Each structure stands twice: as C-alpha cells, then as structure tokens.
Image (cartoon, grey):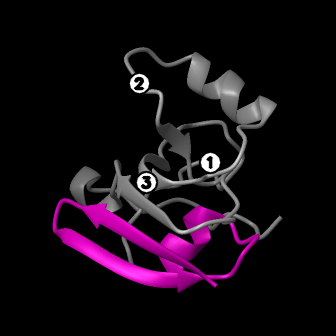
Amino acid sequence: MSRIEAETASGAQAFDAEPGRKLVLAIEDAGIDILHRCGGKAKCTTCRVEVLAGDPGEIGDAERDRLAMETGLAENVRLSCQVHVIDDLKVRVINQASERGMDAGPRPTEE
C-alpha cells in the first residue's frame, strides 16, 4: 500500500491507496471532495493536483498534451485521473466541487 496525504482548503487527510489505482479514485474514495468533470479522460483538467512530495510516475502523452494547453501551471501539477499510484504521495487538491458549487462529474473508470 502507498500512503497518500491530500491537502484541501479545509485541511489535510492521509489514507492508504493500492498500487496501480488511479489517484483521483483513491482521493474520492477517501471521502475527499475533488472535481473530475470529464470522467477521467484527460480532457478538462478539473482533477488537477499539485504534487508536493513523492513520485507520481511518468506523464503520458494525453496528460502532457492537455496540460500544455493551460498557461501558468507549475511543473508539479498533474491530472489525478492520469496518475496511477506507485509511491507515497503528498498532493494538494486544486479544485473541489463544493467550492465551485457543482457536482464532481461522472466517476472515472478504474482503467
């Protein structure tokens, strides 16, 4: 198991996640409010997290291409729907449904 610490506007929460699990699902299943408006398809960037510590793995083409369309993002920003847990991580959740006044979006698939 990997240990994930997720910071939000309301504080931090630590939890365990199975290796290979999509980070967005691990975060959501830990009860943390995170947006994922496109359902985990690397199309919208609402599931962005800032990686503060740990190894999120290599960035894939779909994620790299989508993040390249945004301006002003730090190098350590990743799409949690594209990160598969391989290591302990400390992340900051950037977008929360409760702060935006909308539902989180369709649940991403495990794939």
What's the mark number on residue 73?
A: 2
Q: Which residues are magenta?
A: 1-30
Please state which amino acid type lies under the numbered disc 1. Answer: Cys
Q: CA distance from mark 2 to mark 3?
A: 17 Å
The C terminus lies in quadrant: bottom right
Q: Which of label 1 and label 2 is nearer to you?
A: 2
Q: Residue at x 47, y 44 (%)?
A: 46
Assess whether residue 8 is covered by the magenta stretch.
yes
Q: Is there any visible trace of residue 56 in the rendered image?
A: yes
Residue 75 located left or right of residue 108: left
> For this rendering, which residue is in front, 99 or 81?
81
Q: What residue is drawn where x is 25% and y is 71%?
A: 12
Going from N to C along the chain, the mark reached first, 2 or 3, is: 3
Residue 51 located within the stretch drawn in magenta: no
For label 1, the SS is: loop
Q: Residues within 10 Å of mark 3 (few under 14, many from 20)?
A: some
Disc 1 designates what residue? Answer: 38
**Residue 40 in the figure: left or right of residue 111:** left
Secondary structure under badge 2?
Answer: loop
Q: Which mark is residue 16?
A: none
Instruction: Name the residue nearer the viewer: 107 or 59.
Output: 59
Q: Amino acid at mark 3?
A: Ala
Q: Which mark is residue 53?
A: 3
Distance from Cα at disc 1 to Cα at disc 2: 19 Å
